[in-house]
Amino acid sequence: MSEPLDPKKYRPESLMMSYGYRPELSEGSIKPPIFLTSTFVFKTAEEGKRFFEVAYGKSPKKADETLGLIYSRINNPDLEILEDRLAVWDQAEESAVFESGLAAISTVLLEFLKPGDAVLHSAPVYGGTHHFIHHVLRSLNITPIEFFANQTIEEVEKLIADHPEGSKIKLIYLETPANPTNDLIDLEAFAALAKRLGVVSVVDNTYLGPMWQQPLKHGIDLVVYSATKYLGGHSDLIAGSVSGSRELVTRVRVLRTFLGNMASPHTGWMLMRSLETLKARTDRQAATAGKLADFLVGHPKVVKVYYLGLLEKGDPHYEVFRRQCTSPGAMISFDIIRGEKAAFRFLNALKLVHLAVSLGSTESLASHPASMTHCDIPDDEKARMGISDKLVRLSVGVEDAGDLINDLKQALEAV
Ligand SMILES: *Cc1c(COP(=O)(O)O)cnc(C)c1O
């Protein structure tokens, strides 16, 4: 039998082709097969009893215990290998995968919030998350308390102190950098606030991904992803994940068993394929984004560019960026001259860049947040977040940088 690799001795990109998988258990196949099975055979009834005790959270797994599989809603080889690999990226003890990012997010929120509680969250958050918190959680008598990503921790503490439900906060939920404006939230400050309040802190790290930001290192308890984005990276799957301590991820995984919202073995296999190239793809995407941002900054039809690589010393976000991000990433937003009409003319004229929402994939995408992903947000809140009719969002893919710049150039000429 091959010796498993020690994850502490290698970079994540070196582990993604083999970690957590033993070819000798699968006919020597270099890639894990897709285990298309609903159920697994127990060797003995005693074994079956023990597997269930652990899976249902009735008794913890012992350190030296290896447990077999039960049923593919509870566990499946493709998901288990994938979860081991995902945990490596955030240096987490454990991960759990879901059939979508929103499934991961909603399961975390449902596990740690109960009727009568309040949840503190940053704004903007992903539209689906916003809807879940403000409609589904509110219908369960869980109160949302919202702050803007560009507010300071002192302002947020005052907001909590003044809020009638402020003492009921049980979970802090953050999205940083904020989509689409790239405003940064200081993770260490909010992790400290969560510790002071004795509550769970959760970060949706989809926008930068574990390559460029690792919230757990800054004291955050759980990190969630839409794996549909950078982790999947090819616009061909929907999935989500949660990573953190064994204790907290186990709680989330037990609820997943009863909601039945785990990813399928096929999706698990596709994500393992994607993780092999995560570093190579996203290094390239980030390098190209830097070139595109430089081009946009100098363009007469562009008023302002929101890109982390343009932060300058003295900007309050600069120090936060230096502390918690290892790259500006591959998301650029910019204000175009005039308003929606000009933005639409630009978007309609693009040839190489696709006009679509989503992000993090191999193909470059452009969208208009105010009328698309953020259309639900009231106008006054949009204004406070800096999401105007002039704003265009770009997700930079792996195409040639020169070809992309030429495409932006010709589309800006059409404005
Ligand atoms: C896409 C996205 C989600 C939702 O993920 P799905 O996989 O579509 O369910 C959540 N958060 C962020 C930041 C996203 O971009």
Image (cartoon, grey):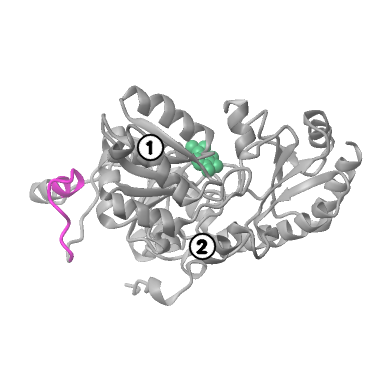
Most foreground residue, 130 or 357: 130
| Residue 36 x, y percent position in the rendering | 38, 43
Q: Circle 1 is placed at which residue position? A: 162
**328 w.r.t. 132: above or below:** below
Question: Which quadrant is home to the N terminus?
Answer: bottom left
Describe the element under mark 2 as helix, strand or loop.
Answer: helix
| Residue 108 x, y percent position in the rendering | 34, 41
Question: Which quadrant is home to the C terminus?
Answer: top right
Q: Circle 2 is placed at which residue position? A: 324
Most frequent secondary structure within the magenta stretch: loop
Residue 11 visible to an observer of this rendering? yes
346 left or right of 96? right
**218 w.r.t. 159: above or below:** below
User: Residue drawn at (30%, 44%), measured in percent from left and top?
Assistant: 252
**148 w.r.t. 130: above or below:** below
Magenta part of the protein: which range?
51-63
